[in-house]
Image (cartoon, rainbow, N blue to C red):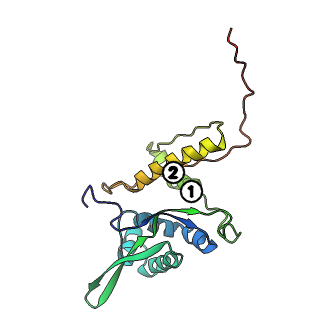
Amino acid sequence: MTVNAPVPDYELQDTIELTTSEQVRAISDPLRTTILGLLHERAATVTELAGAVKRPKSTVAHHVGVLAEAGLLRVVRTRRVRAIEERYYGRAARMFYIGLGRGAGDGKGPRDLNDFEVAAKESVAAYKDGQLRSLIRRARIPEERAAEFWKRVAQVVGEFDQLPRAGDTAYGFTVGLYPMPDYPVLPPGDDTVE
């Protein structure tokens, strides 16, 4: 792959809001999220995806179908191989986010859709090998500042998504911003200094 080639190798939207429980359920399956992750690099056929995840082609075809039905994948190109037309699938968007209060939160979706839980499971081996890089910070800030900061974080995530793919190791990148109502807060300080 050319180092400066755009990632992935097809056109897609930047973001899509998930507004139905079917869409949320579609991304809640670990194999389907792996398929979506692989398609960040380039479009791929069901055969290529099955080889990458070491699962039967029929299983991968089923999961690709679920993602396509939910509008998260689409055919981005085809090619004729002998008498068969091969379909290359790509993501519909770089990033999917759950739209709160518009159908996705109807109680029918998975209750445990938590990127931190997934990241914690994925990072165990890296932690044991001394390869885990992580930071945690806490700050008491107004909601407007939190929203402003999150927009900047989303830009970094977008930059990570578009990095040219190379090397033999895949890296996970997890970020989050969450309220902590029970975290202790100091009372206002005395501004006078003696």
The front one of 33 and 73 is 73
Residue occupying image coordinates x 56% and y 72%: 26
Q: Position of residue 161 (x, y in %)?
A: 41, 56
Residue furthest top as drawn: 194
Image position of 15 with respect to 120: above or below: below
Sequence-first disc among 2 and 1: 1
Which residue is the site of mark 1? Answer: 115
User: Which label belongs to residue 136?
Assistant: none
The kind of residue on which mark 1 rests is Asp
- What amino acid type is highlighted by mark number 2? Thr
Q: Residue at x 52, y 79 (%)?
A: 69
- The x and y percentages for residue 80 are 27, 85
Marks 2,1: beta carbons within 8 A: yes
Q: Residues within 10 Å of mark 2 (few under 14, many from 20)?
A: few
Q: Residue at x 74, y 41 (%)?
A: 182
The quarter in which the C terminus is drawn is top right
Residue topped by disc 2: 174
Name the quadrant containing residue 117.
Answer: bottom right
